[in-house]
Image: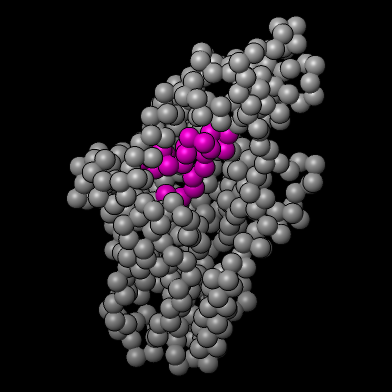
Amino acid sequence: MIKNNPFLYSAFTTKWLTHFNKNKKEFLFSYFPDLAFIKNTYIPLYTNIGKTNTKGISYTLANEEDKSLRNNSFLIYDVHSYFHKTAPINSSRFRLKKTVQYPGYLCELENFSSVAAYMKKNLSKNSNYKFNLYKRKLEHCFDISYTMYYGAIPKKTYIHLFTVFHQLLVKRFAEKQESNNNLDPTEWDFYVDVTYPMILEKKAALFVTYNKEQPIAISLLFFSDTIAFDTIRVFDTDYAPFRLGTISIIEQLQWCVENGIKYLDFSKGHYEYKERWATTKYNFEYHILYDSKGGISRLIAHTIVSYFRLKNYLREKNIHMLFHKFTFLVRSKKENRTQNEKAVFLATTNRPLATNLKPIDMDAKENARLLKFTYQFMYNTSEKLTDIHLYEITNKANCFYIEGLENRYSFVA
């Protein structure tokens, strides 16, 4: 069982009903002591509050059947197979069907005293070397700090972080040319609304990597007694050469170890980084409990199971990726798409004439597209940001000149 599950916490469920169910009535049944439900408008089907916005549900069943369950069906989303152990159903009428929907991944931290020990045990020697190198390079080149906002956060800081969080997500998925469900306005507004009170109650946190005062990587986490649920994570893609996402994971794992968190749960969906870092792979299941003696409830249960099994089959064939790309193309205007530009760096020993060099303000918004090239140069040369100067070469179209203390390059972008 997940003790003190944040997705069953009153602040979470109340906000969810406000944003997704227009404050309609919630239903409680003694047979499900842990869960609350909403009712389908047209058929006798109840679904758990939170639906797919939870990152893991476990539940228990009462010993005695509730007669109000008869002729009804119940759909419970995102049952966490690692923490949920299905108990026998004490009912002559009720039956349970399961359908696997997503893989899940988690890091088991209980037996480790540091992230270094965890990495040594679970990663290859080569990965350990590379990941630590990325971290050293990042912290050498920039003024990096890490903050976990957990238990307290100024409201002004909170609003600013969620604004940057949204900007980074938009940028990330524009470059991937994929839609992302977290950016759906209703879903995003829900997370903005629900996270602040839950941070104050230590049921949620924002983990932020800063370059000076600028957030460059943000993760939203929710907490049970012993589990950190990694819910949404993003990093500024301009810093991609430094593997900022990897460094964020390293720091979060260290925080979890130091604060008695036994599991960092990457939650649903397959990504390469989850496979690399996790110690355990499990399944997210959808559970359908139904009255086997009711004709309509049996039909509903069988239809739901067939539907979700088809969805899972299509997902295994990567049809969902095509769908995300299609919806991105439908929603995006061609002129606003971010292009994955690449620069060719040409080492040079001769500095262009000063009269042909126009200094570029790297903090100016209109020059933001050049940051990725600057940071690639820094990664290649280990030059510090404070020592970098960037210029436009005025007598050559789309040409730039960049120099640090020991290295100088020209590039076209």
Answer left or right for 327 relative to 405: right
Q: Position of residue 204 (x, y in %)?
A: 40, 44
| Residue 214 in view of the camera | no
Which residue sits at x=75%, y=6%?
Answer: 355
400 in magenta:
no
Q: Residue furthest top?
A: 355
Magenta stretch: give its range.
230-252
Q: Quadrant of residue 154?
A: top left
Which residue sits at x=52%, y=80%?
Answer: 305
Q: Position of residue 189 (x, y in %)?
A: 59, 46
Above or below residue 24? Residue 344 is above
Of 43 and 277, the residue lying toward us:
277
Can you say which quadrant of the picture contains the C terminus? Answer: top right
Answer left or right for 261 relative to 348: left
Of 56 and 120, the residue lying toward us:
120
Of 409 and 324, the residue lying toward us:
409
Of 280 and 166, the residue lying toward us:
280
Can you say which quadrant of the picture contains the N terminus? Answer: bottom left
Task: Report the coloring of the rendering.
Answer: one colour
| Residue 246 in view of the camera | yes
Q: Position of residue 324 (x, y in %)?
A: 65, 59
Q: Position of residue 20 (x, y in %)?
A: 58, 57
Which residue sits at x=36%, y=51%?
Answer: 277
Question: What secondary structure characterizes most of the magenta part?
Answer: helix
Which residue sits at x=66%, y=63%?
Answer: 322
Above or below residue 151? Residue 126 is below
